[in-house]
Image (cartoon, rainbow, N blue to C red):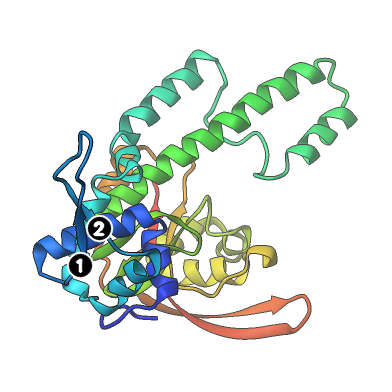
């Protein structure tokens, strides 16, 4: 659904998530233009004289729908987002990331990289158990610390990415809390941010030694491979902002420089086929943006 002209309850809940966010939004929107909200005045206690909304939950959500105006809502929601914990986490992420890198180095954990594929720690332990190593416990202990810290580094880096993208593109309407399947609305259309640590092993195999150059030159091909070879358990043919690492150790300054050059206005249209386990091959067409990060 495109929300440039209207919004439904399902989309409203993706954007606002909670009653508290709804009340803040409607109050700020009412300050911008009168949308006929009902208020009551507190008559006792330290908040005596304060006006608060006097509307039941259903009426609050219905008021979002009936008063929806995209340009007004864009302004109000962006201002509210800048006051959120999600935004604050992104703003301090650059410093936090540098602190985590320093801790990694102080612990002598080696190169900043995953000790094994994400979600494959059990397999890693099994390989260690089947090896001839004499220090198996130490290997697993170190790997578990690396794994936990990589998860933390990735979370902080993703927070940084999301806020950088938001700040550099005034047409982005963000969700006020994490919403599965939707991170932003761009020109009224829903987009989910996905981060990939490579353009897939299939892409790298197809383009051989030149895969990095081809990924930079053909972002639409990168998107096609990421959609085509995604895990079926998390399959989606939704619109996405794909952030793709060609090098594992891209620093935040380089990321910032790359995002500064990106203009999120015209998405790519990408066609792909997916081989479903039960129904076989199906064809899809999606809209997406691709941000390729490399040294």
Q: How many marks?
A: 2
Q: Quadrant of residue 98?
A: top left
Image quarter of the N terminus: bottom left
- Picture layout, residue 27 above or below residue 197: below
Q: Residue at x 17, y 64 (%)?
A: 29
Residue nearer the viewer, 73 or 282: 73
Mark 1 lies on a secondary structure that is loop
Q: Position of residue 148 (x, y in %)?
A: 60, 31
Residue 179 visible in the displayed image: yes
Q: Is residue 168 left or right of residue 197?
A: left
Mark 2 lies on a secondary structure that is strand
Q: Is residue 52 left or right of residue 157?
A: left
Residue nearer the viewer, 214 or 242: 242
Residue nearer the viewer, 161 or 181: 181
Q: Residue at x 65, y 85 (%)?
A: 282
Image quarter of the C terminus: top left
Question: Can you tell which mark lies on residue 142?
Answer: none
- Picture layout, residue 256 above or below residue 151: below
Question: Can you tell which mark lies on residue 53?
Answer: 2
Q: Mark 1 and 2 residues: CB-CB less than 8 Å, in contact?
A: yes
Q: Quadrant of residue 74?
A: bottom left
Residue that carries the numbered disc 1 in the rendered image: 37
Q: Position of residue 266 (x, y in %)?
A: 28, 75
């Amino acid at each position: 659904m495109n929300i440039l002209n209207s919004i439904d309850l399902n989309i409203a809940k993706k954007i606002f998530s909670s009653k508290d966010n709804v009340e803040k939004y409607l109050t700020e929107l009412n300050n911008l233009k009168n949308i006929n909200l009902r208020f009551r005045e507190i008559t006792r206690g330290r908040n005596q004289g304060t006006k608060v909304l006097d509307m039941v939950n259903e009426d609050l959500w219905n008021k979002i729908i009936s008063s929806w105006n995209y340009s007004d809502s864009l302004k109000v929601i962006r201002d509210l987002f800048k006051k959120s914990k999600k935004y604050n986490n992104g703003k301090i992420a650059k410093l936090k990331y540098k602190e985590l890198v320093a801790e990694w180095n102080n612990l002598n954990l080696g190169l900043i990289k995953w000790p094994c594929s994400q979600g494959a720690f059990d397999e890693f332990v099994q390989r260690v158990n089947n090896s001839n190593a004499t220090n198996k416990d130490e290997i697993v202990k170190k790997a578990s610390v690396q794994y936990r810290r990589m998860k933390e580094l990735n979370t902080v880096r993703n927070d940084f990415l999301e806020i950088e993208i938001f700040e550099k593109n005034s047409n982005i309407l963000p969700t006020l809390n994490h919403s599965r399947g939707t991170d932003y609305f761009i020109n009224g259309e829903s987009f989910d941010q996905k981060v990939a640590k490579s353009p897939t092993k299939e892409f790298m195999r197809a383009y051989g030694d030149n895969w990095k150059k081809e990924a930079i030159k053909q972002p639409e091909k990168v998107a096609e491979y990421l959609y085509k070879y995604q895990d079926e358990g998390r399959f989606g043919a939704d619109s996405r902002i794909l952030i793709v690492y060609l090098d594992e150790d891209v620093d935040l300054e380089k990321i910032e420089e790359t995002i500064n050059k990106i203009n999120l206005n015209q998405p790519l249209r990408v066609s792909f086929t997916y081989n479903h386990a039960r129904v076989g091959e199906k064809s899809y067409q999606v809209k997406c943006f691709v941000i390729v990060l490399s040294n």
